[in-house]
């Protein structure tokens, strides 16, 4: 039994198998990832692409967002 991740695009499943596997038929069981997990991975990738690749930078971003939320709260009251 070998576990690999794959991608489905337009109804076609694509996976990469280890080199020791040869041609032939296989039985598949497909588990769909939850939407939340996919969204989290997308957000994480975007954060890395925008330079938020360390704990310190992520904490700075969280702090910045909190300040913006407090400012907005102060304006609405």
Image (spheres, helix red, strand yellow):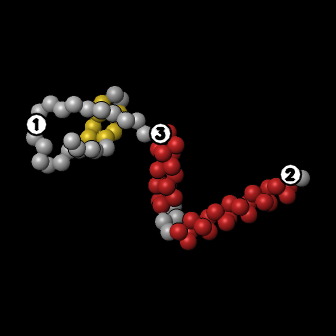
Q: CA distance from mark 1 to mark 3?
A: 31 Å
Report the front residue among 47 and 21: 21
Mark in front: 2 vs 3: 3
> In the image, what residue occupies the spot 56% across and 65% down?
58
Mark 1 or mark 3: name the one nearer the start of the chain: 1
Report the front residue among 38 and 1: 1
Residue farthest along the front direction in this orientation: 1
Report the front residue among 21 and 61: 21
Mark 1 or mark 2: name the one nearer the start of the chain: 1
Q: Secondary structure at mark 1?
A: loop
Image location of residue 72, percent across then percent down? 80, 55
> In the image, what residue occupies the spot 40% across and 35% down?
32
Image location of residue 31, percent across then percent down? 37, 35
Report the front residue among 41 and 51: 41
Picture layout, residue 54 above or below residue 65 = below
Q: Is residue 63 left or right of residue 44?
A: right
Q: Secondary structure at mark 3?
A: loop
Disc ID at residue 23? 1
Total labels: the figure holds: 3
Q: CA distance from mark 2 to mark 3?
A: 35 Å
> In the image, what residue occupies the spot 86% across and 55% down?
75
Mark 2 or mark 3: name the one nearer the start of the chain: 3
Mark in front: 1 vs 3: 3
- The residue that label 3 is drawn on is 34
Image location of residue 21, percent across then percent down? 13, 43
- The residue that label 2 is drawn on is 76
Q: Quadrant of residue 68?
A: bottom right
């Amino acid at each position: 039994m070998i576990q690999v991740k794959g991608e489905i695009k337009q109804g076609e499943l694509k996976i990469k198998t280890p080199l020791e596997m040869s041609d032939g038929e296989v039985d598949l069981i497909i588990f769909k990832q939850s939407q939340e997990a996919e969204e989290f991975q997308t957000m994480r990738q975007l954060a890395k692409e925008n330079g938020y690749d360390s704990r310190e930078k992520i904490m700075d971003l969280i702090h910045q967002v909190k300040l913006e939320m407090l400012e907005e709260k102060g304006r609405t009251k």
